[in-house]
Image (cartoon, helix red, strand yellow):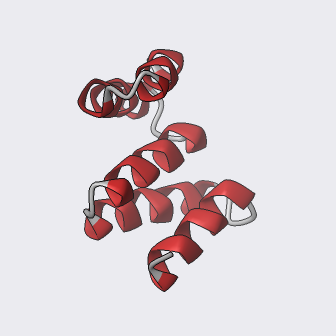
Amino acid sequence: HYLRGVILQRRGEADAAISAFQSAVSWNPRLIDAHVALGRLYLSRGDRALALAHSKQALEIDPQNRDAVALRQQIETGR
């Protein structure tokens, strides 16, 4: 599910990518990369609340994950 999401995201199919990443985290809630990808997609759509929720989930799993930390900073600074 995660790799399908990556492919769909690269194709510009955001809705389908979100669905695939959501499926991936439902199968494995500890899949940090899927949480970060969801956070980025939601942020790109202007949904800061969902982006923040996924960044928090990723950081709960691994507080030192660079991608999750960068996403959190991006959400907080609005950049």
The residue that appears at 49% across and 26% down in the rendered structure is: 10
Can residue 8 be seen by looking at this rendering? Answer: yes
- Farthest residue in the bottom direction? 77
Measured as percent of width and height from the top left, residue 75 is found at 46, 73
Is 27 in front, or is 24? 24
The number of numbered discs placed on residues in the rendered structure image is: 0
- Please determine whether, in this image, residue 14 is positioned above or below residue 38: above
Residue 65 picture quarter = bottom right
Q: Residue at x 67, y 55 (%)?
A: 67
In the rendered view, does 43 fall on the left or right side of 66?
A: left
Mark yes or no: residue 31 visible: no
Q: Is residue 64 left or right of residue 69?
A: right
Relative image position of residue 13 (x, y in whole percent): 32, 26
| Rendered-image quadrant of the N terminus | top left
Task: Please provide percent x and percent y for residue 57.
Answer: 47, 57
Q: Is residue 1 left or right of residue 14?
A: right
Q: Quadrant of residue 12?
A: top left
Position in image of residue 17 (x %, y %): 35, 28
Q: Is residue 44 above or below residue 79?
A: above
